[in-house]
Image (cartoon, rainbow, N blue to C red):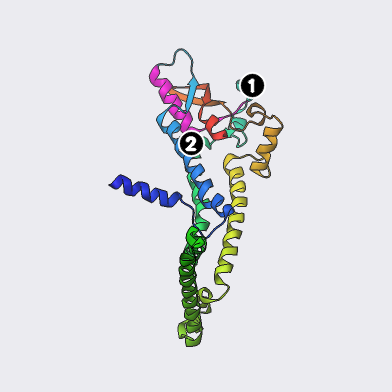
Amino acid sequence: MVMIETFLGMARYLSPRNDDDWSDRMHYLYTPNILLAFSVLISWKQFGGRPMECMFPNKFPGSWEQYAENYCWSENTYYVEKDIDVELVSQETRLSKDRQLSYYQWVPFFLLLQAAFFRAPSLLWKYFSNHSGIRIHEVVERAADAGNVEEETRDKNIDLLSRHLQKALRFQRRIQRKKVVVHKTCTCLNLQYSSGFITSVYIFTKLIYLLNVVAQLLLLNFFLRTNKYDWYGVGIIKDILGGVKWETSGYFPRVSVCDVEIRQMANIQKYSVQCILVINMFNEK
């Protein structure tokens, strides 16, 4: 029974509302669900498998290998082109932001954050539209009822809609006539009873959708440190069309290098090991 209720709750969450259009649904429904699916997929690979596999010297025992892989996963790696000798790369260059790969551990959480940002404007619209006095989703649902082809059903829906709108307008006029002291002092409280409130909220929500997309592209640039792109998505599309691979761009590399320090008695041995970032195959997609 609990599983059925959970499934029905998820179905209601995944179902679109009636008071929006296709662009709204792309923003608050389809995109967040795709991001959530990718987050689950990457989390499964990251926490349930081996997202990173490193190549070690033969003298490394099994316990050292596990320790080194865990260390490299948590402490970041850096990218070095194939034609460059790792030993010739200075310590300062290895630690530079342009070389360091510090995002792959956080990708599932970043995707969840993105999904929340895409979903948030619709919650704002839902809250304010429900407090406007006009239940937009019910109005649209009645108006788009397939049963309206029958005269009886159509007349019934028209009657319900007209009574609902009349009540909302009467309530609005009543508030304006009473001139309550609180509403006279704090004029902002009158906004939700104004005739243009629901239209203003809808336009404002559309503007937030647009600002969110722009902010997400800038946030991706910051998170992935893709400094050569002004706009991350546009730059990636250009690279794909131009046949630019990760070996050239350095973004989402499959192979990286990690510096490991292992204490042996009183000495500290330093090793530079090559690692395969299997998880980056998923991250790039």
Depth check: 39 or 280 in front?
Answer: 39
Q: Which disc is residue 166 wearing?
A: none
Residue that lies at the very extreme toward the right in this rendered image:
242
Assess whether residue 78 is covered by the magenta stretch. Answer: yes
Residue 263 visible, this angle: yes
Q: Point out the tag, 1 or 2, that comes first from the N-terminus.
A: 1
Instruction: Check disc 2 and report the residue beneath it.
Output: 105
The residue drawn where x is 70% and y is 33% is 241
Left or right side of 136 for 244: right
Instruction: Identify the amino acid type marked 2.
Output: Gln
Q: Quadrant of the C terminus?
A: top right
Task: Judge the density around disc 2: few (<14), some (14-19), many (≥20) Cα neighbours within 10 Å.
Answer: some
> Which range of residues does the magenta coloring cover?
62-80
Q: Position of residue 177 (x, y in %)?
A: 50, 87
The residue drawn where x is 32% and y is 46% is 4
Instruction: Check disc 1 and report the residue beneath it.
Output: 82
Q: Position of residue 160 (x, y in %)?
A: 45, 71
Q: Position of residue 121 (x, y in %)?
A: 52, 57
Assess whether residue 26 is covered by the magenta stretch. Answer: no
Q: Position of residue 74 (x, y in %)?
A: 46, 33
